[in-house]
Amino acid sequence: MAIGTHALIQEKVSYQNLALVITDEQHRFGVRQRELLGEKGGLPHVLVMSATPIPRTLAIILYGDLHLSAIRELPVGRLPIKNCVVGTAFRKKAYEFIAKEVHGGNQAYVICPMVDAGEEGTQELENVTDYGQRLRSCLPEDIHVEILHGKMKPADKKRVMDAFAAGDVHVLVATTVIEVGINVPAATVMMIENAERFGLAQLHQLRGRIGRGNQQSYCIFINGSGKESSMERLQVLNKSNDGFSIAEEDLKLRGPGDLFGFRQSGAMEFRIADIYQDSDMLKKISVTVDRLLAKDKELSQAGHAMLKRYLEENAGNFIDFRTI
């Protein structure tokens, strides 16, 4: 058994008899990366795991070409996260709420889209460096605030995370560097600045850093743009903590991409059909195809000659659906 990162798909890495490929956090891998891993062992069984399937993967599920197992129950003792989507005018009340939670023995995350100021075209976005300083002056002096981002030295990042995990840091102002691999059960509040600049799936992944203990947790999405369209999109997260439901909305908004190519989102080139609205039809077609192949796997019967010829002529345009 080999457990690793992207290093497992390097050209120089080979496998004698690869029979099973398991990909965790599947949404973080590209189509080509998943295809390369699948090519390293004939036709291995493939299991992918994700809290928020990318639009392309969800579309394949709707097509009926991917078996789905959904874990919808929360772990024992955990409560559903309470959410709210607000404008920047709510920020002061949010700070007061964070202070209340910290004084109650809990901790908080504040997420910013930028590391520091000065990047062209991003001046209106909140950044970790300035925000950390500002937050220290807005919260009571007994609340310890630290910052964390990907540009920090590994030793400094470890020091901050260890202090946060130990409860010595009360509020952590960070970028999306905390999206995966962080488990601090005492963290009960997450406030995401400029939430409109993140994808729905990424926001759901970030939100997953809280609600890991038996205390009630809260996620505050700040719409920094003030646009009504952004508020409407963020309401998807306000209404649901279910990653699969959020992925469905993401599919509607972004499109399924190219099922036979590498695009993982975007509109499909259908003139009439709609992959989501016509999902019932897709399921019926999938069942019909399964029955057809069960009777004539090689499409050798005379009535299937045209279909077989079409598939043979266009085979070069297709990518095996195992590259989910």
Image (tube, rainbow, N blue to C red):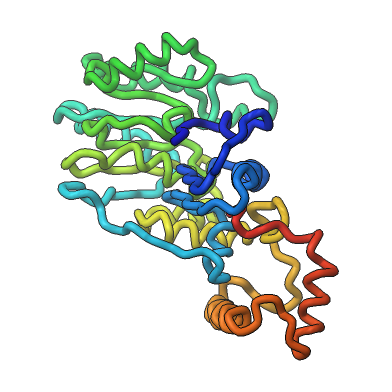
How far across and down, in percent of the image, does residue 46 sit? 51, 52
Q: Is residue 278 visible?
A: no
Q: Residue at x 52, y 64 (%)?
A: 66
Along the line of sight, the residue nearer the viewer: 119 or 76: 76
Q: Residue at x 16, y 26 (%)?
A: 103
* Quarter the N terminus occupies: top left
How many dots with numbers? 0
- Specify the farthest residue to the front: 16
Q: Residue at x 29, y 36 (%)?
A: 189
Along the line of sight, the residue nearer the viewer: 221 or 256: 256
* Quarter the C terminus occupies: bottom right
Residue 16 higher or lower than 323, as above or below: above
How far across and down, in percent of the image, does residue 266 sit? 68, 57
Along the line of sight, the residue nearer the viewer: 24 or 157: 24
- Specify the farthest residue to the right: 313
Left/right of residue 1 with respect to residue 301 in the rendered view: left
How far across and down, in percent of the image, does residue 248 sit? 49, 62
Left/right of residue 250 with respect to residue 183 in the rendered view: right
Residue 47 higher or lower than 64, as above or below: above
Which quadrant would residue 17 be assigned to in this image?
Answer: top right
Q: Residue at x 58, y 80 (%)?
A: 294
Residue 302 higher or lower than 237, as above or below: below
Q: Is residue 152 visible?
A: yes
- Specify the farthest residue to the bottom: 303
How far across and down, in percent of the image, does residue 297 sit? 65, 77
Left/right of residue 40 with respect to residue 177 in the rendered view: right
